[in-house]
Amino acid sequence: MPSTIPSLKATLNLHGNRSGDDKVKEIAFALRGNTFLTTLILSKNSLSNDAITALTKSLMYNRTLMKLDLSHNKIDDFGAKEIASALSETSSLTHINLDRNEITFKGAKEIAASLTVNVSIITLILSNNRIGVLGTEYLAQALKENNSLKCLLLQYNVIGFRGAIKLASALKMNTSLTTVDLSHNNILGEGAKALLFALTKNNSLTTLNLSWNEVVVDNDLASALKDIHSLTTLDLNRNNLRTEGVRQLSSMLRENNSLITLILSWNDIRSEGIKEIGIALKKNTTILNLNLGDNNFGPEGAIEIARTLKENLTLTTLDLSYNAIGNSGAADIAQALKVNKSLTNLILKSNRIGNHGARDIGLSLKENKTLTTLQLQVNEIGPFGVRHICASLLGNDTLTFINLSDNSVRDGGAIELALVLRVNKSLTTLRLAASRIGFLGTKAIGAALKKNHFLTTLDLSDNIIGNDGAKELAFALRQNNALTALELQLCNFGFEGAKELGTTLKENDCLTKLDLTGNTIGTDGDKEMSDALKKNVSLVQYINPYFAHSRSFLFVERNQTQVATMYFQPKFQLSGLYLLLNCNNCKHRLGTSLLYHILKEKKADLELEQNKRFPALGNENNVSLVLNKAAKELKVKYIYMI
């Protein structure tokens, strides 16, 4: 009897395919009867008004689509009006992305009107359009009536302080919004002040992004922050706060008891400002995450940070990236880590830390028992510094994530790390990209992987491991049963390395992600990997030099003889399955037809044969019917066109 496709939650991703009107219209028509597609991504497809009209009309009939991405499509006010009409009728759509289009205040007016009647949309993304002050005013009026929208993203819309004031009036009445992003809108201090005073009357908003807005923090603004009780995340990145602005903020922090995450990066905060923040954090008991990156406060600021860490009992994540603290600053931070009992995530990226700074941090890890994540990428750490960090790992059982990418680790440092991997039982992620590691270091790490049963992610990208290094890793993975993600971008290996990795994939059932981007494996190497994927049962994401995709049981390939080949393994048991159409030219007629038939849930009762060949263009319907049958039997959840 004919088979039926079960009810499924599916994603169709057509990002960047430039599908054209006819193809989008086919998919739109299929949506009318489709009952399992929940996410449709049509970003960067140069959609015309006709295509938008066809799509929006279908939305009025569809009852399952929840997320629609129409970003990067040059949608104008006419298209916005069509979308608004659909929003007034649909009851299933919850997320709509209209980022990077050409919507002005006219289109915003139509969308705003739809929000007064729509009760399903919870996320609206209108960033990178040109809605301006007037468009913001229309949205603000709608928000006074709408009680379902939770997330509103309006960055890069030239709304200015007048638009911010209009939105502030809505926030006094709105009871549903939890996240608002107004970054890059030049709202100035006046606009920020209006918003924050409005939040003293609002009990729902928890996240507010005011970065890149030339906000000046004065006494009035700080006073408003003291009286806000719902806001948990505040982003003030790139507002040129300087010492005086930080002084006002620190007075607020001493009394505010709601903020959990505070982002103050790129604000020209020098050591005096850091001192003010430190004083506030000695009293504040709610801030868990603090970002002070890109402030260039140097070793002097690091001294103040260290003093704070010795007394603060609540901070868990601290980002000090790009502050040029050097070895002396690292030494001060290291001393604080010996006594700090709360910090779990420390980011010291790009701080001119060398071997001596790494030595001091390593010594502190012997005593610290709370830090789980240490990020030291883009510094000046060599094998000597790595050795000291490794020495600490022999006695540390809490650190799970280390990033030493973009340092001079070299083979000597890699060998030291390999010795640790043989015995360490806590480290799960190790990132060593662009660390000047060659064959000898890779060989040592490979040998360690045969003994290690805890590391799950390894990044060796942008190292010159060559074919021999790739082979050593391949040999290791035949014995390793823990590693799930291996990143080998730009590792200077070719067919021989790919061939050995392919052989390993036929045996390894743990690896779920493999990235080979930027290696010259050639078509022969690609074939070796494709053959391996027919037998591999674990890999979910495979990224090679020619394309990136999430894989499943099915590969439909276009070859020079215009034949579609299906590879089917019925014994595969995975929780997240994918149907992949991997074609040389994604715009060809076959791919769209297959998607169209699958979306319409066309029924078929055809027998599947492993590696059976079907004519690609001569008999499209047969191919689509076979795929349709496979979709049912394999319970495909995600559909990708690449």
Image (cartoon, grey):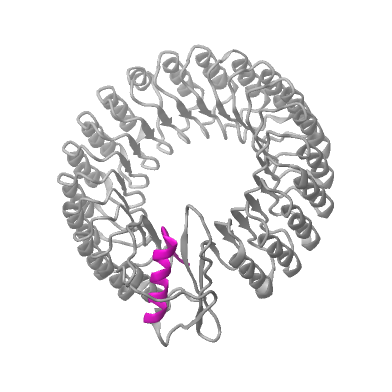
Viewer-proximal residue among 528 and 469: 528
What is the x, y in percent for residue 378?
Answer: 68, 42
Q: Magenta stretch: give its range.
A: 621-642
Viewer-proximal residue among 178 and 61: 61
Viewer-proximal residue among 554 and 467: 554
- Residue depicted at 52% across the width and 33% down the height: 265
Asked if the stretch drawn in magenta spans residue 465, the answer is no
Tell me, yes or no, if residue 18 can be seen here: no
Tell me, yes or no, if residue 340 can be seen here: yes
What is the x, y in percent for residue 235?
Answer: 43, 33
Image height check: is 180 above or below 535? above
Quarter of the image where one finds residue 271: top right
- Residue depicted at 75% across the width and 31% down the height: 393
Quarter of the image where one finds residue 546: bottom right
Q: Is residue 612 left or right of residue 120?
A: right
What is the x, y in percent for residue 160?
Answer: 31, 40
Asked if the stretch drawn in magenta spans residue 634, the answer is yes
- Residue depicted at 55% across the width and 76% down the height: 611
Q: Is residue 556 left or right of residue 404?
A: left
